[in-house]
């Protein structure tokens, strides 16, 4: 009887020892995991990657804005080459290495075919005109062994002359143009002002007034441009747009309707 | 008869001493577990709150600059030298008990000439043990490439 009781006590002590070993082992693993996360400063690295990503997207906008205003086809390549060098300077000690590839050839996006050359395209002087840029950026962070993090970014601006109508009443003769503007997303651009537009009728610059509203007719956000005192049916309508990012596009149409009344 | 009663008493005593042993064993076992945990706790160097605080401030600082950039205001403020607007935007966006100091550098690390952009006394920055520093890069504005590096220092007041 005494021997049995003694054996039971030993068993409980052994069980307790095993339990304590288990607790120690689990606690060590958990503690190691927690401190590893803290030691590696993941937050800082995520912040750097995020910062470079946002700035690269902004660079694409700056490049497209420059291209649409100067027509310098190699501007995006030049900017990215400088950007690769400057990012290393901006984050010394992190082993940041940036590489990029600019879009090339025909790609379909936002309902149009975009023919990229060195990551840039402008398709202007059409009823639906657009400017676009596209690049893929690769980020390596040697300090944490992060390699091959890449993302694609694109910038887009599209203007569509929905219609252009010449109203030829004796008392009031004017031209009314309805325009819609989209950017990447696709997303309707709704914050443009009169100063963002320029209008030409039959090649001559015109003064105009502008309204913007959501149109039930087009089920879209519309910019309505009115040019007063137009005595004859114009042969062409040209609308130039430069958005708040500095990106430009020019739409052109000869399809001008004459109001029946 | 007496023998029988004595035997019964003995058996009762044996049962009670067996129960006592079980209790002692349980106490010993729990003592071993507690001492093991206590022993481990001695070696557990829990992270101090200072790095945690700095990390938290860095996160706040980066998020605020990112938000202002997303609204397309950051580049405008920096390249058009709208320093007062930039300071106001930061004051509004940051929590009220967070003080900041912002310096703008070119890509070679030379400071851009701008007025002091600071919220909170210099003493707060000097005396604080947890000063967070956030670097944010802006590549250019409108059509020109001219990177600017914003260094935002943050402390909790």
Image (tube, coloured by chain):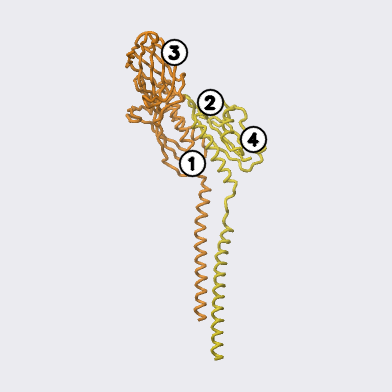
Chain colours: A orange, B yellow
Closer to the observer: label 4 or label 1?
Answer: 4
Circle nearer the N terminus (4, 2)? 2
Q: Which SS class for mark 4?
A: loop
Where residue A169 appears, x then y in whole percent? 37, 10
In the image, are marks 4 and 1 on the same chain? no
Marks 4 and 1, Cα distance to the nearest angstrom? 28 Å
Q: Nearer the viewer, mark 3 or mark 1?
A: 3
Work out how far the residue at label 4 is from the one at label 2, CA to CA, in angstroms: 25 Å
Percent of width and height locating residue B148: 53, 30
Q: CA distance from mark 2 to mark 1?
A: 26 Å
| Residue underneath mark 1 | A46
The earlier-in-sequence mark between 3 and 1 is 1
Q: Of the numbered discs in the image, which one, if any, rests on residue A229?
A: none
What chain letter is assigned to the residue under label 1? A
* Left or right relative to A111: residue B120: right
In the image, farthest residue toward the right: B123
Relative to residue B43, is residue B82 depicted above or below?
above
Chain letter of mark 4 equals B
Inter-mark Cα distance, 4 to 3: 51 Å
* Residue depth check, mark 4 versus mark 3: number of the one nearer the observer: 3
Residue on which the image places disc 3: A207
Q: Are marks 4 and 2 in contact (CB under 8 Å)?
A: no
Badge 4 is on which residue?
B120
Instruction: Rate crowding at label 3 as few (under 14), some (14 to 19) or many (20 or more) other CA atoms within 10 Å.
Output: few
Q: Are marks 4 and 2 on the same chain?
A: yes
């Amino acid at each position: 009887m005494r021997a049995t009781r003694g054996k039971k006590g030993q068993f409980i002590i052994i069980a307790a020892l095993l339990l304590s070993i288990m607790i120690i082992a689990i606690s060590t693993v958990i503690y190691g995991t927690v401190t590893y996360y803290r030691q590696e400063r993941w937050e800082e690295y995520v912040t750097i990657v995020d910062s470079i990503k946002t700035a690269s997207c902004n660079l694409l906008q700056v490049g497209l804005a420059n291209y649409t205003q100067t027509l310098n086809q190699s501007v995006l390549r030049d900017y990215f080459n400088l950007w690769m060098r400057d990012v290393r300077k901006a984050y010394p000690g992190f082993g940041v290495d940036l590489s990029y590839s600019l879009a090339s050839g025909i790609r379909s996006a936002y309902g149009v075919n975009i023919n990229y050359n060195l990551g840039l395209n402008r398709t202007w002087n059409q009823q639906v005109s657009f400017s676009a840029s596209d690049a893929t950026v690769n980020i390596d962070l040697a300090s944490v062994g992060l390699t091959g993090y890449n993302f694609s970014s694109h910038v887009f601006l599209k203007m569509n002359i929905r219609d252009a109508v010449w109203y030829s009443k004796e008392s009031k003769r004017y031209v009314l143009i309805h325009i819609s503007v989209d950017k990447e997303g696709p997303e309707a651009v709704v914050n443009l002002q009169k100063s963002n537009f320029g209008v030409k009728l039959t090649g001559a610059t015109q003064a105009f007034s502008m309204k913007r509203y959501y149109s039930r007719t087009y089920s879209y956000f519309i910019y309505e441009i009115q040019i007063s005192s137009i005595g004859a049916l114009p042969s062409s309508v040209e609308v130039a747009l430069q958005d708040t990012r500095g990106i430009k596009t020019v739409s052109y149409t000869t399809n001008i309707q004459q109001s029946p009344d | 008869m007496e023998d029988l009663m004595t035997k019964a008493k003995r058996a009762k005593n044996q049962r009670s001493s067996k129960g006592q042993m079980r209790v002692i064993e349980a106490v010993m076992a729990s003592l071993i577990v507690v001492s093991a945990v206590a022993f481990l706790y001695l070696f557990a160097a829990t992270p101090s709150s200072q790095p945690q605080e700095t990390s938290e401030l860095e996160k706040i600082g980066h998020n605020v600059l990112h938000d202002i950039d997303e609204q397309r205001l950051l580049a405008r403020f920096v390249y058009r030298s709208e320093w007062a607007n930039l300071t106001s935007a930061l004051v509004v966006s940051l929590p009220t008990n967070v003080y900041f100091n912002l310096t703008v550098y070119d890509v070679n690390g030379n400071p851009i000439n701008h007025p002091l952009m600071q919220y909170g006394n210099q003493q707060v920055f000097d005396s604080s043990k947890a000063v967070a520093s956030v670097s944010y890069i802006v590549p250019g504005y409108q059509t020109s490439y001219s990177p600017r590096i914003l260094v935002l220092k943050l402390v909790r007041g």
